Image (cartoon, coloured by chain):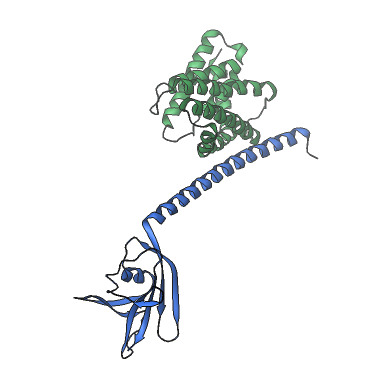
Amino acid sequence: MGRELNATQRTAIMAILTASTIATNYILIGVVNVKLMDLIVFTSGYLFGAWMGASVGALTWLVYGTLNPYGFSLPILGATVLGEALYGVAGGAVSNFWRPTNWRPDARLAVVGFLLTFIYDIFTNVVSALTVGVPIAVSLVGGVPFALAHEASNAAFFCLGFPPLATSISKVMEAYVK
Amino acid sequence: MLSKQSLTWAAAALLCTTLAGGAASLYYYSRYTQLEAEYRETLDELELLTIKVDIMIDYGDGTAVWHNATRVGMAETLLNATLQVADVQYTVTEFGAFVDAIDGVSGVESHYWIWYRMDGGWQMGPVGSDQYRLHDGDVLAWIYTGF
């Protein structure tokens, strides 16, 4: 699908997806570590390529990580930007070998969501520990409840949310992108 | 027969559950050790604020019950310590508290609840039980004594 779009269309789609991701983040700001962001970024990478997915993830965190009521930290922002981009890159990578013709909830997507989130949580917790000066083990163990909430919710979102989201975006693209 | 791809995904799913279970175990073990350390610390602090005494209650019918290592507040009175380990009925008079019954034992003619302190042998309490301030390691007795 990425090869059919020109630069203007790609920029517009990137902006729309980034805005959607940021909006869902603010809607769910009270629910710690449960966000639709990772799913949308992964889907962006899947539908439009790894570069687009990584860009949506990075741009989302550049806004959400800067204008965030929980505070701002440059090293942690860097980690979250990189970590979030991973979802987009992974989405692009998955699209290279997995193109089902009929979308439906798939447990394999839950596995992908869980493992990606696990890597993201480990990475960001380590960077947070180094930034704040807390022992890494303490940060990792103390963050387990939040990490598990993040991983479990993403497993569910990827399994149940990816098929309808990918289908919807694909239909919109077919209808409006000429 | 499962395909290699199915087995790979099953292994990946099991990896997820293992990671989640392992992380949860690590977290709860960490919480357990942390709470145990806090419990020990609290006990140590409690040791500094409380004392332990042994209280024996002799009901005068051949029955005697020991309440060993009873933990009470520092400088607590014997009466209050006894109230912790038994059902005590007492009357407050101008001379102090007079114990009428312990665990319902009373009413025998010429018998009274008298308290004693172990000091080389049982020594009768020099003051009322509400006046005597306990010391760590005190060994005391309430004996239903007949006169």
Farthest residue, direction bottom: B109
Q: Is A155 drawn above or below residue A49 in the view shown?
A: below
Q: In which quarter of the image is the C terminus of chain A?
A: top right
- What residue is shown at x 56% (from left), y 38% (from top)? A152
- What residue is shown at x 68% (from left), y 20% (from top)? A96
- What residue is shown at x 44% (from left), y 77% (from top)? B65
Q: Position of residue A27 (x, y in %)?
A: 42, 30
Farthest residue, direction left: B94
Farthest residue, direction top: A7
Q: Is residue A88 visible?
A: yes
Q: Is B14 drawn above or below residue A22 in the view shown?
A: below
Report the front residue among B52 and B8.
Answer: B52
Q: Colour of chain B?
A: blue
Q: Where is residue B59 in the image (x, y as percent from the top left)?
A: 40, 82
Report the front residue among A125 and B139.
Answer: B139
Q: How many labels does the image show?
A: 0
Q: Position of residue A18 (x, y in %)?
A: 48, 20
Q: Where on the picture, by quarter, is residue B142?
A: bottom left
Q: Position of residue B97 (x, y in %)?
A: 25, 75
Q: Is B46 drawn above or below residue B146 in the view shown?
A: above
Q: In the shown orientation, is residue B110 left or right of residue B38?
A: left
Q: Is A139 drawn above or below residue B147 in the view shown?
A: above
Q: Can residue A49 be seen in this view?
A: no
Q: Quadrant of the N terminus of chain A?
A: top right
Which chain: green?
A
Report the front residue among A47 and B92.
Answer: B92
- What residue is shown at x 39% (from left), y 68% (from top)? B138
Q: In the shown orientation, is residue B121 left or right of residue B10?
A: left
